[in-house]
Image (cartoon, helix red, strand yellow):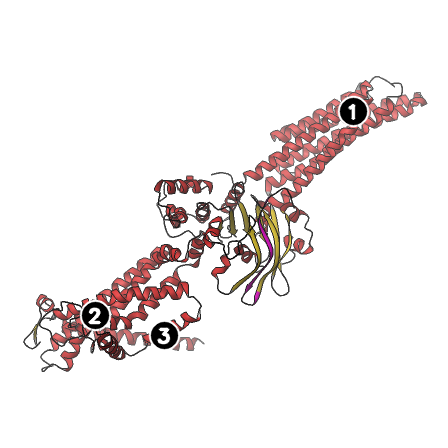
């Protein structure tokens, strides 16, 4: 992998258990700053679990145990003194299905600021506009900011969710199959947006659509389950290499559609 | 197979018809005998001449006040309990026990609530027999309705909203307050109104906790005794010195109680309908 | 609404520019090799031979880039034809440059020997072949099928010139055995130029395919 890039997220020997079940096993990888890293693999290989370990969302589920280390900017986010609220502000997340709140477009984007106790109307308005612009949605919604977010199309809703995540000024954005519920054109628009966002943010995307990973990412990690159904990292490298000359036969089998 | 299908269809249709039939008969009977009694005087005057004449205003007043008082207690406690069960203690053993207790509460005979209310509120807490004790007793009876319907409303809020909130760095309470509760509000209101409908018609829990046979004045504090519609029907049909003579009053009172309960239920249905339309 | 594939479009555009640069280099190599022949300029010939490394590298780079685009961007329809055309065309261009090297090598050998005859037809062949290549590349840039078709027709001229050169040199050889080696070398050179024109024709055919989707020989 390219050594010139600064490492943003560093994962070391990560194990995650659901109860007694080992969901992902001994994952170690480094995610470079200001780039798009895709995690691909068949269903149930622990991609989402891995992603949700990066902002500790797994802890919302009961009975989840995490071992190992995840460091962002060199700080282990699993150390006991970490403030979860701050962590999640720094590591935004976009979900599989667009999930705007049943509020106005404006309030959706402003939500992250309001819960921080920010009351300054002008500052909120500025941030909302900036976030919507960054999410390439401003021109489409600027005349209906106070309409319900649920009136937007699926693709617009997803970009709204991205804007909502951007509003709290994260450095890392996690995307959990962000386009799986969208049509092809809306999908390409999200991908295009991701390419723009990587200039400023570190993006990690989980996708079962490997063409999408091929199109959009700089680095690709391939996950697969072992015989105990625990997800493992099989191969990780430059996306071009993974898709033109994978080293592991299992990666090759998966991306050529012959296996997995 | 065909034949079997037909049998089951007929059985289920028959069961439905029986219920509708019974219900229509009751409503029709009450309407037929009660509608003539309803006059402005009946609704606005106290009973006269040993309760054989006059109106039922004190009973309407008592019923409404003790029901509103009940709401004041039952809604916050019920809603917070449901929030605890569904948001904080989800899946924990403790909340399983609480849920079991609440479900059991719903199956306790209502006279037992009356006895408990007398023992606990009236005597032990020395609240005396009056509106407050009665409202609290009815409140315990309707608590399961509020808890269960609130829980249902909370569960209906998609988890993805909560996740989105947490992912933005919201605390649990922030997520509940600014995302979950606004979404669940119609459901919570429905539950509250249903509890009103239920509590309004209850008589047994009032028996030892504050309801009066007859009062020449309206209650002026929450510790005063009060008259009540359900209880009024009960005494008119069992203890009146001339049951035949007061029959029209009995029907009229029943009709008023029915209408009050019905209107609360209709409001609940309306809110639920609007909520559904908003969601889809 | 912004075209969501604009980055892919940009990469294809860059690829087309690379292809043109490679075409220009190949063209210059042939041009220089014939200039070196006419002027008996060994150092210019050497320049052509050394310069071929750059073209070979471009060939590999463009091919890798095409493979990566196919793997990562799943090109369809016209995008796919453009990339296919580029993949085929770089092979023709690389071959043209190789022929320039072949000619340059002969030039270095002939430089030590007395000239056989003044060059008339060979520079003419070179001129026509290169004008064909120029037009093929121009047709590629401007997506001009008409130009591509017309340019292919000139292959016949080159073929005719080749026959003429061949017969003429054959006479030289029959007249004077000492001239055989030099004449043979010149026949090779004419042959290489004839091949350059054939490769230019291939490029023209690909351009037509890229634009219309119809793949056929334009000069049989």
Bin the neighbour count of mark 1 within 10 Å (Cα to Cα): few under 14, some 14-19, many 20 and up. many
Find residue C105 and report its image quarter. top right
- A194 lies left or right of B168: right
Marked residue chain, label 3: B
Q: Nearer the viewer, mark 1 or mark 2?
A: 2
Q: Secondary structure at mark 2?
A: helix
- Farthest front residue? A81
- A1 lies left or right of B193: right
Find residue C151 and report its image quarter. top right
Estimate the spatial distance between the alpha carbons at disc 1 and disc 2, rounded to whole Å: 111 Å
Q: Position of residue C170 (x, y in %)?
A: 88, 24
C39 lies above or below B126: above
- Residue B280 shows up from this direction: no
Find residue A248 and report its image quarter. bottom right
Q: Which residues are magenta?
A: A6-21
Q: Which residue is mark 3?
A: B101
Q: Predominant secondary structure in magenta?
A: strand
Q: Earlier in the sequence, mark 3 or mark 2?
A: 3
Q: Which residue is mark 1?
A: C33
Bin the neighbour count of mark 2 within 10 Å (Cα to Cα): few under 14, some 14-19, many 20 and up. many
Bin the neighbour count of mark 3 within 10 Å (Cα to Cα): few under 14, some 14-19, many 20 and up. few
């Amino acid at each position: 992998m390219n050594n010139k890039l600064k490492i943003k997220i560093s994962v070391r020997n990560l194990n995650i258990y659901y109860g007694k079940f080992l969901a992902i096993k001994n994952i170690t990888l480094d995610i470079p700053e200001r780039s798009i890293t895709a995690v691909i693999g068949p269903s149930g290989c622990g991609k989402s679990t891995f992603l949700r370990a990066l902002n500790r969302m797994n802890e919302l589920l009961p009975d989840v145990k995490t071992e190992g280390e995840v460091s962002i900017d060199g700080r282990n986010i699993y150390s006991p003194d970490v403030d979860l609220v701050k962590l999640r502000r720094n590591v935004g997340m976009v979900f599989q299905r667009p999930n705007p709140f049943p509020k106005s477009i404006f309030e959706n984007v402003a939500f992250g600021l309001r819960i921080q106790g920010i009351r300054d109307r002008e500052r909120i308005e500025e941030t909302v506009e900036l976030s919507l612009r960054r999410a390439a949605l401003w021109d489409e919604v600027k005349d209906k900011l106070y309409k319900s977010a649920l009136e937007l199309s699926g693709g617009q809703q997803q970009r709204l969710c991205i804007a909502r995540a951007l509003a709290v000024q994260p450095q890392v954005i996690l995307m959990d199959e962000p386009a799986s519920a969208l049509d092809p054109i809306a999908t390409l628009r999200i991908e295009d947006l991701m390419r723009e966002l990587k200039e400023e943010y570190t993006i990690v995307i989980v996708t079962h659509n490997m063409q999408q990973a091929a199109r959009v990412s700089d680095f690709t990690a391939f996950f697969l389950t072992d015989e105990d159904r625990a997800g493992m990292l099989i191969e990780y490298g430059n996306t071009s290499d993974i898709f033109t000359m994978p080293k592991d036969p299992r990666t090759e089998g998966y991306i050529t559609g012959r296996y997995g | 197979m065909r034949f079997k299908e037909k049998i089951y269809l007929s059985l289920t249709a028959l069961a439905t018809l029986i219920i509708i039939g019974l219900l229509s008969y009751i409503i029709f009977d009450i309407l037929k005998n009660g509608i003539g009694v309803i006059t402005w005087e009946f609704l606005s005057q106290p009973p006269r001449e040993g309760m054989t004449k006059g109106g039922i205003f004190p009973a309407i007043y008592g019923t409404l006040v003790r029901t509103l008082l009940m709401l004041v207690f039952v809604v916050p406690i019920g809603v917070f309990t449901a929030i605890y069960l569904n948001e904080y203690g989800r899946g924990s053993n403790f909340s399983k026990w609480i849920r079991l207790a609440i479900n059991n509460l719903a199956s306790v005979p209502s006279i037992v609530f009356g006895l408990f209310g007398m023992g606990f509120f009236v005597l032990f807490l020395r609240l005396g027999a009056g509106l407050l004790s009665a409202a609290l007793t009815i409140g315990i009876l309707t608590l399961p309705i509020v808890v269960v319907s609130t829980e249902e409303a909370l569960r209906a809020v998609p988890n993805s909203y909560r996740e989105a909130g947490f992912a933005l760095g919201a605390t649990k309470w922030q997520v509940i307050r600014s995302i979950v509760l606004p979404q669940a509000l119609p459901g919570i209101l429905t539950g509250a109104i249903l509890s009103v409908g239920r509590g309004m018609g209850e008589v047994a829990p009032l028996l030892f906790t504050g309801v009066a046979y007859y009062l020449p004045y309206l209650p002026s504090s929450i510790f005063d005794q009060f008259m009540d519609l359900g209880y009024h029907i009960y005494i008119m049909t069992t203890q009146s010195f001339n049951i035949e003579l007061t029959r029209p009053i009995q029907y009229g009172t029943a009709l008023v109680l029915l209408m009050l309960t019905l209107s609360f239920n209709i409001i609940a249905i309306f809110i639920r309908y609007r909520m559904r339309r908003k969601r889809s | 609404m912004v075209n969501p594939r604009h980055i892919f479009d940009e990469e294809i555009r860059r690829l087309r520019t690379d292809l043109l640069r490679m075409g220009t280099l190949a063209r210059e190599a042939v041009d220089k090799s014939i200039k070196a022949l006419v002027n008996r300029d060994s150092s210019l010939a050497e320049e052509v031979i050394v310069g071929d490394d750059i073209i070979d590298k471009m060939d590999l780079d463009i091919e890798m880039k095409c493979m990566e685009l196919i793997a990562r961007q799943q090109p369809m329809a016209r995008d796919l034809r453009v990339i296919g055309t580029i993949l085929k065309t770089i092979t023709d261009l690389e071959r043209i440059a190789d022929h320039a090297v072949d000619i340059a090598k002969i030039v270095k050998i002939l430089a030590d020997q007395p000239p056989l005859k003044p060059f008339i037809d060979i520079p003419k062949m070179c001129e026509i072949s290169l004008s064909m290549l120029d037009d093929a590349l121009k047709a590629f840039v401007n997506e001009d099928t008409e130009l591509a078709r017309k340019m292919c027709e000139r292959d016949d001229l080159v073929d005719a010139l080749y026959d003429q050169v061949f017969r003429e040199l054959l006479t030289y050889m029959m007249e004077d055995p000492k001239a055989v080696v030099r004449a043979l070398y010149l026949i090779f050179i004419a042959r290489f130029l004839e091949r350059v024109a054939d490769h230019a024709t291939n490029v023209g055919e690909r351009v037509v395919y890229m634009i219309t989707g119809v793949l056929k020989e334009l000069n049989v």
